[in-house]
Amino acid sequence: MTALIETVALSKTFTLHGRGGLQLPVFSGIDLSVRAGECLALTGHSGSGKSSLLRCLYGNYAASSGEVRIRHQGAWVNLSNAMPREVFELRRRTLGYVSQFLRVIPRVSALDIVSDPLRRIGVDASVARERAAQWLQSLNLQEHLWHLPPATFSGGEQQRVNIAHGMITAPAVLLLDEPTASLDADNRRVVVALIRAAREQGSAVVGIFHDDEVREAVATRSLNVEQYSKPVASTHGSTT
Amino acid sequence: MKPGVLLSARGAGKAYAQQGQPRWACRDVSFDLYPGEVLAVVGESGSGKTTLLRLLAARLGCDEGSVHYDLRADLASGPGNLVDLALMSQAQLRRLARTDWGFVEQHARDGLRMNVSGGANVGERLMALGARNYGLLRREALSWMARVELDTGRIDDLPGSYSGGMQQRLQIARNLVTQPRLVFMDEPTTGLDVSVQARLLDLLRELVDELQLAAVVVTHDLAVARLLAQRMLVMKDGCVVEQGLTDRVLDDPQHPYTQLLVSSVLTP
């Protein structure tokens, strides 16, 4: 099987200019490669940079050095030097991301949020809404909520909208940040089944799974992000 | 030159004379905009973002660098070539501004004709293109008013009798009636009540999506940028200090000024 996402010597350091250029090293020198059908679980204690790594893989955070490469329509795209429109196209067709929290667009219904990614790849609006309804159904989101904007939903309900939104296009590379964090046992099982199905269909998955049971059920291997953390925080310039 | 580029700024800048010395309102701005892309230009007032918008829309001439636009075949001499705006005649530019471009002003009054009806405001660009059939113009006006969610019963009223939000909708309809490929917007939601602003943003987001419009949106509101634009450009003292994917710039700002900007708002 071919690798669909890989990093080479990936490093991330935040520079806080408002704090006199304070450097906050997160991780450095990460080489990873995930093939179709694999699921790599990122592990490490809270604050070890798992989410930051995932955001780098999505292009939401800029790599400080090193590379993130995604296999897109038969060619590697390097996120660090891709143009915004290329990253957008990559996200539309190849790269899915389920964040920890749903960023709700005010006044847009759950059904529209979930069907939107399909419409963006050219699926007819009514077909897209039908498929979205199926996803929300399988994730046990009560039907009377479908036409409401998720701003007032519970954490678990929002998370399920978020999962449907991120997975509905069956992206070849799927990034999951604690997808089951606020779900009950029944819905956790549903999400585990969805992730396994994605793998079987040939997606490469990278995820953070807080729950050991979930991680064991979906992951094929794991990577401890802590081992890549830089030990000392250094400052340069004057602190104010 | 890259294929498919719609608008290209190449080191564009504008200087004003201040006590005999040139003062650069914006300097050395370069980017390529592609069809369907929405670019937000953010920065505090006085950062040069409105001057930049006026350079891009050929309302001002460049004092350095240039701005190029991909003319539609019916306007260009040859097929699909990027033309330097400075080399176009006034007549060509006027035609471009009335057909393939839209310009949404911050104050709707600056973009509307206040002494003719709402319907006539929408029809004006079509008339400028030679449409004379009253029935057709009225149908278009009604259809566009409905599209921007304006009460079609107000078609014969003067825009002065409209609320601020309605005027802004009318201005948008007036601009889109010729199906432009590129729309310039100068703080399109600023100065409106929050609820009106929100509905206008919904409308803009849908229209941009549906019509595959390219747009350059000047705003000081980072939330507007996040909602509407895939890309953004951060300006300070006339210079672009950072540009890139909107969510990357807002969630992982690199430049000191962008970091300050992002950390200064309550919910970006």
Image (cartoon, coloured by chain):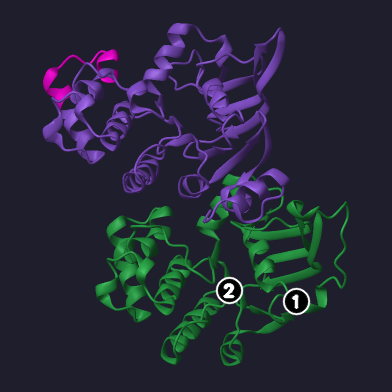
Report x, y in % for residue A91: 55, 57
What's the residue at 23%, 41% (across, down)? B149
Of the pair A33 and A146, the residue shown nearer to us: A146
> In terms of image quadrants, where is residue A217?
bottom right
Report x, y in % for residue A124: 32, 55
Q: Chain of mark 1?
A: A
> For the N terminus of chain A, which image quadrant?
bottom right
The three-letter amino acid code for the residue at tag 2 is Asp
Q: Is residue A188 visible?
A: yes
Which residue is denoted by mark 1 in the rendering? A225
Q: Chain of mark 2?
A: A
Q: Is residue A211 above or below residue B193?
A: below
The three-letter amino acid code for the residue at tag 1 is Val
Q: Which chain is green?
A: A
In the displayed image of the protein, which residue is found farthest to the front?
A: A240
Highlighted magenta segment, given as a residue range: B125-138
- How far apart marks 1 and 2 lie (CA) works out to 14 Å
Residues packed near mark 2 inside 10 Å, few (<14), some (14 to 19) or many (20 plus): many
Looking at the image, residue A118 sits to the left or right of residue A147; the answer is right
Q: Chain B hue? A: purple
**Disc number for residue B131:** none
Which residue is denoted by mark 2 in the rendering? A177
What's the residue at 58%, 36% (across, down)? B44
Q: Is residue B133 magenta?
A: yes
What's the residue at 61%, 56% (across, down)? B251
Looking at the image, residue B246 sits to the left or right of residue B71; the answer is right
Q: Is residue A145 magenta?
A: no
Q: Is residue B81 visible?
A: no
> In terms of image quadrants, where is residue B5?
top right
* Main secondary structure found in the magenta portion: helix
Q: Is residue B86 above or below residue A146?
A: above
